[in-house]
């Protein structure tokens, strides 16, 4: 029960732990999600409220961790009692953990709030019947402040925009709030609110939304922009307060606002020169931006070293089904163009994407694997991530597969498997679900191997001879460093894959999959 007599209240925002070790686990221990930090920073400006964030995927050993993963919430509640607890539902695979923690706090009479991309359509009722008192639909910076005021009795709950709650067992949804447009009025994300975490890679952002309209993606709508000055302010603030050096710009597509993006890069270049420090920045970008050498040059001079590109598939029929507006024959040359500017290219792929019903194209798993391996080799991609299609709630992909009655029931294959590592629907013939899953392990296993540990050693010993045999040391360094770095990353990837496969073998997914397939046939 919310205590109105208290002079100060505490909001605790929780980022739930991943259900098991997966390909994201390593990076999650070095970063955190930007969304909860933005929401917490908005609440931190409210009179009478304290706020903290607990990221269960990034807990120091000295923090309130548990051997089974996640945080010890009994310890946290005894140490610093929360009056309201918010939950980040941006990743569907963490939803079962989210509901479990919500149940713990609900039993203690704590008000529970959740928000994130998962909570759309039928999942609204599911959440409100799973120990969640209020759902924030869409962006939360403005809504959370109004909702907390309503909980305090200072505002009519029905006047809070874009929330859902139960009233006498009925789901009530308030009118939808207009998307945020003026980002400069919001407080800068305050990462000091994230407790017990060790953050090395700081997420920052300028653009929300994406107009590409990919079938499998939840991010839709016209993009909205903050000023380049605001993004630079985020970076400089983190450098000054946290000595941050590594940043990930979370915009879905870096460079959507081309001229403003170039202006930002030039500003960032001048800023680094003025402080005498070189920053390391990663972005997500469209493949066809390789046609813009002015943009790429500005990016490199600004310290952008790593780019993540959604290649998705080298198979034309799959790209058409995804609504990707590019042809495989153009993809190799575009990827190589990024190499010429010295970027480390991280390629993201989706294996076994389901084709449309009117498509007669069929391909054996072995041939599919061959297409992926050949493309990765020809495009000279530095690091890769190959996942399975995930029919996320609210996407066109999920709607299409539901109509075709191909999705496995969440009663058999629960939300915790929605991380791209498990088959979630009946694949196109002649491939089976088991073959689809083993295929991504074969592709990744070919790319990330133990042998690269020895190659790294040999390459390290070759460094002095190569450098001093060349007249231009800077040029020699570039020739030596990139392959050394890639071999090191491939060995590191092998370590992560080994842990991932070990975790998979210990699980019970195979039995769940068989039940799901049997129920789908009935």
Image (tube, rainbow, N blue to C red):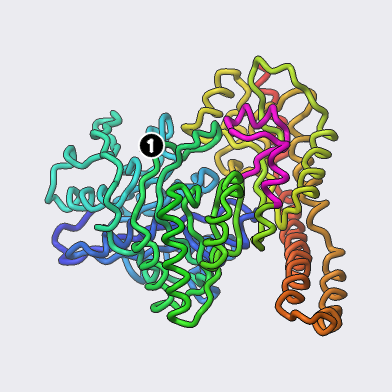
**In front here: 206 or 45?**
206
For the point 72% across and 24% down, the residue is 428
Q: Would you say residue 75 is visible in this rendering?
A: no
Q: Residues within 10 Å of mark 1 (few under 14, many from 20)?
A: some
For the point 63% across and 21% down, the residue is 356
**In front here: 32 or 289?**
289
Q: Is residue 198 magenta?
A: no
In the depicted structure, whether residue 379 falls above or below residue 188: above
Which residue is disc 1 drawn over?
129
In the depicted structure, whether residue 270 falls above or below residue 151: below
Asked which quadrant contains residue 23, the reply is bottom right
| Place of residue 471 in the rendered image (x, y in percent of width and height, measured from the top left) | 79, 82
| Place of residue 420 in the rendered image (x, y in percent of width and height, measured from the top left) | 63, 43
Q: Is residue 326 magenta?
A: yes
In the depicted structure, whether residue 481 falls above or below residue 164: below
For the point 42% across and 69% down, the residue is 235
Q: Would you say residue 54 is visible in this rendering?
A: yes
Q: What's the magenta region?
A: 310-336
For the point 37% across and 60% down, the residue is 228
Dot 1: what SS?
A: loop
Tally of marks = 1
Asked which quadrant contains residue 216, the reply is top right
| Place of residue 429 in the rendered image (x, y in percent of width and height, measured from the top left) | 76, 23
| Place of residue 522 in the rendered image (x, y in percent of width and height, measured from the top left) | 65, 16
**In front here: 154 or 265?**
265
């Amino acid at each position: 029960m919310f205590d109105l007599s208290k002079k100060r209240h505490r909001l605790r925002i929780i980022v739930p732990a991943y259900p098991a070790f997966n390909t994201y686990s390593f990076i999650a221990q070095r970063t955190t999600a930007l969304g909860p930090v933005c929401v917490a920073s908005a609440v931190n400006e409210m009179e009478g409220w304290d706020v903290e964030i607990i990221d269960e995927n990034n807990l120091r050993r000295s923090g309130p961790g548990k051997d089974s993963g996640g945080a010890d919430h009994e310890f946290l509640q005894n140490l610093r009692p929360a009056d309201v607890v918010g939950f980040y539902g941006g990743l569907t695979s963490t939803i079962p953990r989210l509901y479990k923690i919500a149940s713990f706090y609900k039993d203690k009479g704590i008000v529970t709030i959740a928000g994130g991309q998962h909570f759309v359509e039928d999942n609204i009722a599911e959440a409100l019947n799973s120990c969640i008192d209020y759902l924030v639909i869409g962006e939360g910076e403005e809504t959370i402040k109004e909702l907390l005021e309503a909980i305090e009795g200072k505002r009519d709950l029905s006047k809070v925009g874009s929330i859902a709650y139960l009233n006498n067992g009925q789901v009530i949804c308030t009118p939808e709030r207009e998307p945020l447009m003026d980002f400069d009025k919001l407080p800068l994300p305050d990462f000091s609110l994230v407790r017990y975490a060790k953050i090395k890679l700081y997420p920052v952002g300028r653009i929300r939304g994406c107009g590409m309209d990919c079938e499998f993606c939840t991010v839709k709508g016209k993009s909205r922009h903050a000023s380049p000055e605001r993004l630079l302010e985020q970076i400089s603030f983190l450098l000054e307060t946290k000595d941050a050096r590594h940043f990930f710009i979370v915009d879905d597509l870096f460079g959507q606002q081309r001229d403003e993006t170039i202006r930002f890069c030039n500003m960032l270049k001048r800023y680094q020169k003025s402080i005498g420090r070189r920053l390391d920045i990663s972005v997500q970008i469209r493949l066809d931006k390789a046609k813009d050498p002015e943009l790429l040059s500005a990016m490199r001079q600004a310290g952008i070293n790593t780019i993540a590109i959604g290649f998705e598939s080298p198979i034309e029929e799959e790209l058409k089904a995804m609504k990707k507006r590019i042809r495989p024959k153009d993809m190799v040359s575009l990827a190589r163009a990024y190499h010429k500017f010295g970027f480390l290219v991280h390629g993201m792929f989706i294996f076994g994407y389901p084709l449309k019903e009117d498509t007669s194209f069929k391909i054996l798993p072995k041939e599919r694997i061959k297409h992926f391996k050949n493309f990765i080799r020809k495009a000279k991609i530095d690091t890769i991530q190959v996942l399975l299609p995930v029919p996320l709630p609210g996407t066109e992909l999920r709607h299409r597969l539901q109509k075709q009655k191909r999705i496995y029931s969440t009663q058999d294959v629960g939300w915790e498997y929605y991380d791209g590592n498990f088959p979630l629907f009946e694949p196109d013939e002649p491939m089976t679900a088991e073959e689809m899953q083993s295929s991504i392990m074969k592709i990744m296993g070919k790319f990330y191997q133990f042998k690269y540990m020895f190659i790294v050693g040999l390459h390290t010993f070759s460094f002095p001879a190569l450098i001093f045999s060349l007249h231009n040391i800077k040029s020699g360094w570039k020739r030596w460093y990139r392959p050394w770095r890639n071999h090191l990353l491939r060995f590191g990837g092998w370590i992560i894959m080994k842990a991932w496969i070990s975790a998979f073998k210990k699980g019970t997914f195979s039995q769940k999959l068989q039940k799901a397939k049997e129920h789908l046939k009935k």
